[in-house]
Image: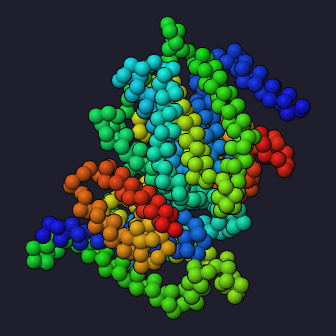
Amino acid sequence: MILVQQVVGGLAIGLVYGLVALGFVLLLRSLDLINFAQGEMMMVGAFLALGAWQGLGLPFPLAFVAAVLATAVVGLVMDRLVAHPLRHASLIHLVIATVAVSLFLKNAALLLGGPEPLVFPSLFGETPVTFGAVRLAPHTLLILGAALGLVGLLQGFFLWTRSGLALRAVMADAEMAALLGVPLARVRAVAFALSAALGATGGILIAPLVFVSFDMGSLGLKAFTAAALGGLYSIPGAIWGGLLLGVLENLLAGTISSGYRDALVYTILIAVLVGRAIRR
Amino acid sequence: MKRIFGVAAALVFILVLPLVIRDRYILHLLTMSGIAAFLSIGITLLLGVAGQVSLGQAGFYAVGAYASALLTTRLGWPFWLALPAAGTAAAGAALTLGPVFHLRGHFLAVATVAFAEIVRLVLLNWSNVTNGPRGIVGIPPPQFGSWVLDSVSTYYYLVLTLLCGALWIGVGLRRGRLGRAWRALGGNPEAAEASGVPVMKLKALAFGLAAFAAGLAGSLYAHLVGFVSPHTFTFEESVRILAMAVLGGLGSFSGGVGGAVALTLLPELLRAFEQYRLLILSALILVILIFFPRGLAGLWEGRGRNDG
């Protein structure tokens, strides 16, 4: 039964990784860009949600939505101030710029929020929910529900909205899409906003499990590992990769220390990237 | 001609500095700038010449620092053996990355981030050897026979001498066949491969050399400060090293050295704004990338050329 609990807990964290990984995949497919600030979007989302909920006293669902939208705006600003001026620069310059943005957001959060990790209270308390002999933290269920709902919403966005269609066209073939009159600048903005929103969602959902702190963006590398496990360019792959990584991490907990566990995850990341490159 | 004059004037200025400045702290900072210049030369070769992004130089820096610290404190090696050993250890770490050189561009960059993070986690957790988060103390100053280099000004000249050697090798490598091949690799890897440039070997060599320079920097740092801990070798440090090359203008050694000096001294000048240090650094990187992509080298080399 412990095993089932570990697996379900891993699936919940894995869904969070998957959501953030989706943000990576969107920018990789539309701009061929790895956004090093994606992890910081988790941090921004978590901080804003905590501020809106506990600070301003908004009801949680409203605080959640407001924080996600505000982080999407951060993504838009990043597109406007950084990616847009560098659209003709080499990819290396753009990648270094996203690294600088990540450092900027992290240190802005350190200045505004202080170095102490903040507790993000669990919405449904700490009393476990029991299914027969399986005991689950109530927050796990929120993550599972919210993440699955979001994946559905995202699917709807891609299938039924004009922006979603344009984004799909650019992801399939950017040059052809531009020739056919898809406004690339706008699609790029949508991609930045959407991946920031996905990052924020992941950050808010995982916050009660890991504390809210200026350096929680380091989870971004885990999410990138999830994207890599899922094939880097695949949308369902990102979710599957996240689930795989989440379960793996949870099963490893207790057998090795968390430091070595993270080192193992990053070794897997390198191995997966190299494996992809050699196969092609 | 004007150029040779400029270089000579700069060299004389650098040589007499310790005679004029008696303040130990300022000399210490200048020595740290010289050590940073090793890191910068390495990444300038890697990124500016060969076009390969590394966001993990702090990892190689750490390997060099810890190798030197452990060899001298645990095994009693003398400094002049530990220094090249530290460079070799870092270069060896880069070469064990072997298959990683199949990766390109930003994927390679992510792999280097992961590598440096693994190094940091191992240093933090392998307490029997590395003493974990507390680090290694009591690293001796360099000693040649009975002559102990424990004054800052002698250390300054030691770093300066080694730095001149490194610059000479760097500039020589870039001028020669190897430099041409690296530029081909950075410009267009497919075309380079098609014209018979051994892409994998060249990438490994560029990474190995950059890591060697970072390893030397690590050793020099360890013996100057006398203490190493994992907290020095973070992702932020990798970004700072990358920023030196960006500030220098990507590909110019003189610019890279200028970037290293600027990014070591500026934070001290802005000491009153200590908590804004990394915020200012990141904003600076963005401003340079967007508005001054030729960096410091653009200031003193004029338009159209980039071969300082």
- Left or right: B140 as drawn, with respect to B131: right
Between A49 and B214, the one lying in front of the other is B214
Residue A104 visible in this rendered orientation of the protein: no
Q: Is residue A120 above or below residue B17?
A: below
Q: Residue furthest left?
A: A133
Q: Is residue A111 above or below residue A207?
A: above
Residue A161 place in picture, x, y as percent: 54, 90
Q: Residue furthest front?
A: B196
Residue A268 visible in this rendered orientation of the protein: yes
The residue under the point 77% across, 27% down is B10
Between B251 and A139, the one lying in front of the other is B251
- Left or right: B66 as drawn, with respect to B193: left
The residue under the point 40% across, 55% down is A266
Q: Is residue A203 above or below residue B22?
A: below
Residue A259 place in picture, x, y as percent: 32, 49
The residue under the point 58% across, 48% down is B201
Residue A213, by quadrant, is bottom left
According to the image, what is the colour scheme of the structure? rainbow
Residue B195, by quadrant, is bottom right
Residue A132 place in picture, x, y as percent: 10, 77
